[in-house]
Amino acid sequence: MLLAIVDTEGIVTKETKYGDSSRILTVISRELGKISILAGSVRRGKSGLLTATAMFSHSRFTLFKGGSSSLYKLNEGELLHSFAPLRESLEEMAFASYFCDVTNCIIQEEAPDPPQTDLLLRTLYMLTRPDEDFEKIKAVFEFRSLTIAGLFPNLRQCGGCGRVDGLHYLSPTEGCIYCAKCAASHADTIQITDSMLAAISYIALAEDKKEFSFTMQPTATKYLSEIGERCVEQLLEKSFKTLSYLRRVTSLG
Ligand SMILES: [Zn+2]
């Protein structure tokens, strides 16, 4: 069997036990998209490899790829950034797991998506910063992800008649906004204020790395985040277990 050696850098977004001591890692790589890596048992004295393959770690990997198999085998791993705080707090872990889950749904096997990969990285960084509003981070991640995926094509005009003012109804199933007249013929719209629409448009259209740079009251970001998760589940046509878990965790707080 022909073995190819592949070097890549990526984020560990899921881990599954495999056999007694092995794991299969799902890694989001900028160059390769979503890949599966078989990580065998880590020998004593190789603790660096253990950190490099921990959940949320951003690492450089040297992999073997054999023949037609889509599974890579881990040879070496070098940690770039550990995101350790995300594994130490229940709440941070719940948010980070949900962001990884959504990214694993959006990015396909071996289909590189650098904008979404970079957004996930920036979002995980934001979560580790002190005194951040997690619901705001979540809302930004959600609306930005849907925009990158092309599911929110136009927030500037009514999806029905094209008018550009009085847009107060958002459709989480169609990914567009409507005026009151057009909303009347769409059952599942959510009413939004001008400032809510301004925030969603800002998130969607801001330059990379600027998407988090706006201020909003926590009550408003909480509502924005609720709209965000409805849009994510409807437009990606999936209900995320990590989101139900996140909601159980945040309701304790
Ligand atoms: Zn209209």
Image: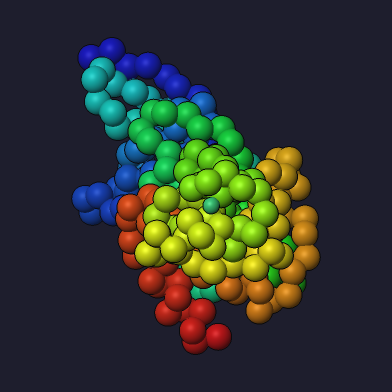
- Residue at image x 53%, y 40%? 153
Quarter assignment of residue 71:
top left
**Is 240 on the left or on the right of 10, as rendered?**
left
Of residues 225 and 163, which is closer to you in this image?
163
Quarter assignment of residue 92:
bottom right
Q: Quadrant of the N terminus?
A: top left
Find residue 118 and report its horizontal and vertical position in percent: 61, 40
- Residue at image x 44%, y 63%? 184
Residue 157 against residue 193 in the figure, above or below = above
Residue 72 against residue 215 in the figure, above or below = above
Find residue 204 and report its horizontal and vertical position in percent: 63, 47
**Is 182 on the left or on the right of 204, as rendered?**
left
- Residue at image x 56%, y 32%? 114
Q: Which residue lies furthest to the bottom in this view?
A: 252
**Is 3 on the left or on the right of 222, as rendered?**
left
Find residue 134 and report its horizontal and vertical position in percent: 62, 68
**Is 108 on the left or on the right of 8, as rendered?**
left
Quarter assignment of residue 35:
top left
Q: Quadrant of the C terminus?
A: bottom right
Find residue 199 and report its horizontal and vertical position in percent: 69, 59
Q: Residue furthest front?
A: 181
- Residue at image x 42%, y 19%? 5
Residue 183 in view (yes/no): yes
Of residues 112 and 219, which is closer to you in this image?
219
